[in-house]
Every structure is written in C-alpha cells, then in structure tokens.
Image (cartoon, helix red, strand yellow):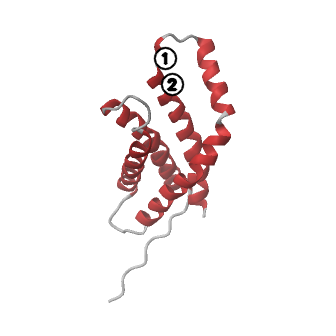
C-alpha cells in the first residue's frame, strides 16, 4: 500500500513539473529568460498542480502496479526494476504526449518520454529505499 502512496504523491508532482518544462521549452519560452520569468514558471506550476494530480494520479498508480509486479520476480534486482519501470513509463508518456502540437521528431519524443521516466524511476527508488519489500516465496517442488 505504501508503494502506491509514494507513486501517487511523487509521480504527478514531478511529472507535472517536467511536463510544464517540456511544453515551455517546445514553445520557445526559454529563448529570453530572466529571473522573473523563472518565477512566473513556478507560479504557473503551483497554480496548475491540482490538474497535475487530477490527470497524473491514475497513470502513476499504473506505473506503481508495474513496479509491484516486477518486485515479485526474483531475478530482477532493484536497479534493473527501476530501469524497467522507467522504460515502461518513458514509452507510455512519449506515445501519449509526443504527437501533440505541430512539432514532431526525436527531440520531442525524448523530452516527453522523460516526463514519464524521471518520476517513475524516482518513485521506484523511493519505494526501494523506504518501503520494506517482502521477498517472493520459494516455489515448492
């Protein structure tokens, strides 16, 4: 249960921030920035945080379920599990978001993929670090 709570709290927060950074980069916002422009970015982030949780809650729980499934496979260690969960989230996020807007290409695919990868890996690491993981039962023969 703690695993899903961590994924539900961390995933939309980081994913929403990275999605905001990606969309502002794609729009050309970062061409001429000052300290006040960065402050505006954080104001927009905190004003839209409720929507990040609204639309990121279920995808984060789905990624948490993948992490929960992978923990029961004995041969997969924590680092490989984090990378597999991150890869799964990368693919899902890039397929979901990269077709938005007029631009398409490798840069957009990678940027939107990182929106899923980073929160998934961070959440999986936090679960590994702070949640007691039960060892899978040995198969009886």
Near mark 2 (Cα within 10 A), the count class, few <14, some 14-19 or many ≥20, is some
Q: Is residue 7 left or right of residue 51?
A: left
- Horizontal side, residue 116 vs residue 83: left or right: right
Label 1 secondary element: helix
Q: Secondary structure at mark 2?
A: helix
Foreground: 141 or 61?
Answer: 61
Rounded to the nearest whole Å, what is the CA distance between mark 2 and mark 1?
A: 7 Å
As displayed, is residue 78 above or below residue 11? below
Q: Nearer the viewer, residue 14 or 99?
A: 99
- Looking at the image, which residue is at 34% across and 62% down? 76
Q: Mark number for residue 24?
A: 2
- Of 99 and 136, nearer the camera is 99
Identity of the residue drawn at 37% across and 48% down = 91
**Residue at x 60% of width, y 12% of height:** 35
Residue at point 64% right, 27% down?
44
**Residue to which mark 1 is pinned:** 30
Q: Mark 1 or mark 2, which is nearer the start of the sequence?
A: 2
Q: Quadrant of residue 34?
A: top right
């Amino acid at each position: 249960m703690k695993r899903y709570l961590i994924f539900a709290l961390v995933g939309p927060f980081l994913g929403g921030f990275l999605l905001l950074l990606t969309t502002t980069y794609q729009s050309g916002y970062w061409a001429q920035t000052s300290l006040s422009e960065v402050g505006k970015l954080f104001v927009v982030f905190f004003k839209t945080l409720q929507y990040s949780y609204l639309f990121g809650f279920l995808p984060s729980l789905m990624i948490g379920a993948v992490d929960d499934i992978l923990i029961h496979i004995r041969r997969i260690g924590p680092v490989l599990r984090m990378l597999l969960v991150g890869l799964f989230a990368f693919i899902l996020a890039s397929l979901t978001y990269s077709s938005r807007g007029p631009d398409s290409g490798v840069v957009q695919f990678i940027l939107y993929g990182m929106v899923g990868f980073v929160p998934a890996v961070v959440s999986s690491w936090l679960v590994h670090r702070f949640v007691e993981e039960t060892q899978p039962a040995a198969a009886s023969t």
